[in-house]
Amino acid sequence: MKKLTFVAAAVLGLLSASAVMAQSSVTLYGIVDAAVTHTTKQVGGSRTGVDAGQLATSRWGMRGTEDLGGGLKANFALESTLINDTGAGGLGFGGNTTVAGNTVGNAAGSTTSLFDRQAIIGLSGGFGAITLGRQNILGVDSIGLADPLSLAQPAINPNVAFSALNSGAFYSSFGTNDGGAALRQNNSIRYATPVMSGFGGALMHGFGEQPGNASANTYSGVSGFFSDGKSGVALAYAKLKNRTDNSTLTLWGGGAKYAVTPALTLRATYAQNEVDTTNRKIAVIGAGVDFLVMPALTLTGAVYNTKNSGNVDGKANQYVGLAKYALSKRTNLYTIFTHAKAGSAAAKDTALGLITTVGNDSANRLSVGVLHVF
C-alpha cells in the first residue's frame, strides 16, 4: 500500500508539473533584413555597400508568458538589435559632437547593450499591463501607427530620428539613458490600459536615479490611440530631463491613417520637440500613401518635411518611394528610393536631411534587399 501511495504521488506530481509547464511559453523570434545600398554625395563621394535593417531593423529576441490563473499573466521580453551585415549585435552611444549648430553629447559608437531594444518584466490581466525595465518611449507606438513608411528605413527615417527621438547626436543627453538613444528609456515603469472598443492608452515614467535630484535624467509620458485594425489615430506627449543643467525636452505629436479602400491607405503625422533653455524646436510633418497593386505587391509613396527653429533655422525634405513584394507571409523582397533635399549645403540644413552631407544640399539613396521574419 505504501508503495502504491508513493507511485500515485509521483504520478500526480509529474502531472502537476506538466500542467504548469503547459501554462508557460517562451518564444525565440526576430527579423533578418539586409540590402545592397547606393548613396550619392557622401563625404569622399558615393558609397555602395551591404547594410542591415533597411525595411525594418534586424533584431532577435526572446519573450515568454506564464498563466498565473484568474486572467493574470507574468510576461517578459528581451530584444537585441542585430547588425547582420557584420554579425555585430546591440547598439550604444558615447562621446560629444556638434550637429546643425547644436552642441550635443553621446555620439554613436562607444558603449553597447546586449538587449538594447527592450528588456522588460511585468504582469498583465483585465486591468491592462504593467512592465518594468528598458522599453520604447510612448511616441514610438503613437507616431509609428501612422508613419508614412510604417517606420521603414529606421536609420534615415525623419520620424524615427526626430519624432521618436532616436538621434543620439541630438537627444541622448536627455532622459534616463545619459549615454544612449532617447528612443528607449532605461529604469522605466509603464502602464498600458486594456483596449476597449479600439481605444487604449499608456503612462510611462523613467527614473533618472541621480542622488539628490529626483527629476534629473527622467522621462515622463502619456499616450492614447484608437484603431479599428485598418484606420486609426494616436497622440503622445512627453517630457525628458537633462542631468547636467536640468533643462527639459518636451515632445508631442500624433498621427492618423485612413483606409480609403481595401487597396488604398492614407497616412499623416505631425510631431515637434523643444528644449526650454535654447528654444530649439524640431518639427516633422509626414504624409504618405499605400497602394495594394496585388495581394503580394504594395507600393508606398512618402514625403517628410523637417524644420529646426529657435536657436538655428534649418530645413530639409525627404521624398521616398517603396515597393514591397511578399514571397510568403514571412519573407519580402523590396526596393526603396530616397531623395533628400536640404535647405542649403550648410550643416544646419544637411543634418536634417539625414543622408545629405555638408557641402551638398541633396543626395539620393537606393536600396534593394530582402527581409525574413522568424
Image (cartoon, rainbow, N blue to C red):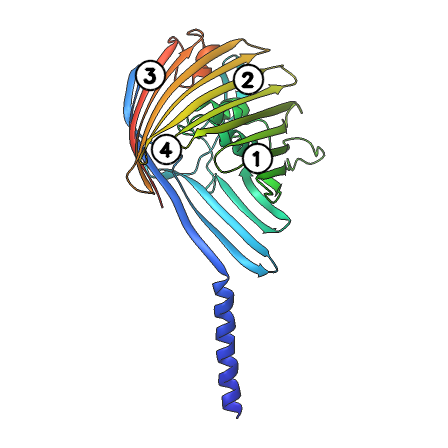
Identified by mark 1, the residue type is Phe
Identified by mark 3, the residue type is Asn
Q: Which residue is mark 3?
A: 364
x and y, in percent, of residue 127 in the image: 64, 49
Decide: few, some or many residues near mark 1? Use Cα within 10 Å; few <14, some 14-19, many ≥20. some
Q: Which residue is mark 4?
A: 53
Query: Does residue 373 appear left or right of residue 240 in this picture?
Result: left
Q: Can you tell which of label 3 and label 1 is closer to the viewer?
A: 1
What is the spatial separation of the Cα atoms under label 3 and label 1, in whole angstroms? 36 Å
Query: Which residue is painted at 62% across and 28% down in the image?
Result: 237
Residues marked 4 and 2 touching at CB (< 8 Å): no
Q: Which residue is mark 1?
A: 226
Query: Which residue is painted at 49% across and 38% down in the image?
Result: 229
Nearer to the camera, 151 or 247:
151
x and y, in percent, of residue 185 in the image: 56, 36
Decide: few, some or many residues near mark 3? Use Cα within 10 Å; few <14, some 14-19, many ≥20. many
Query: Where is residue 368, by image quadrant?
Result: top left
- The mark nearer the N terminus, 4 or 3, is 4
Q: Is residue 24 above or below residue 99?
A: below
x and y, in percent, of residue 193 in the image: 62, 43
- The mark nearer the N terminus, 3 or 2, is 2
Residues marked 2 and 1 touching at CB (< 8 Å): no
- The mark nearer the N terminus, 1 or 4, is 4
Identified by mark 2, the residue type is Ile
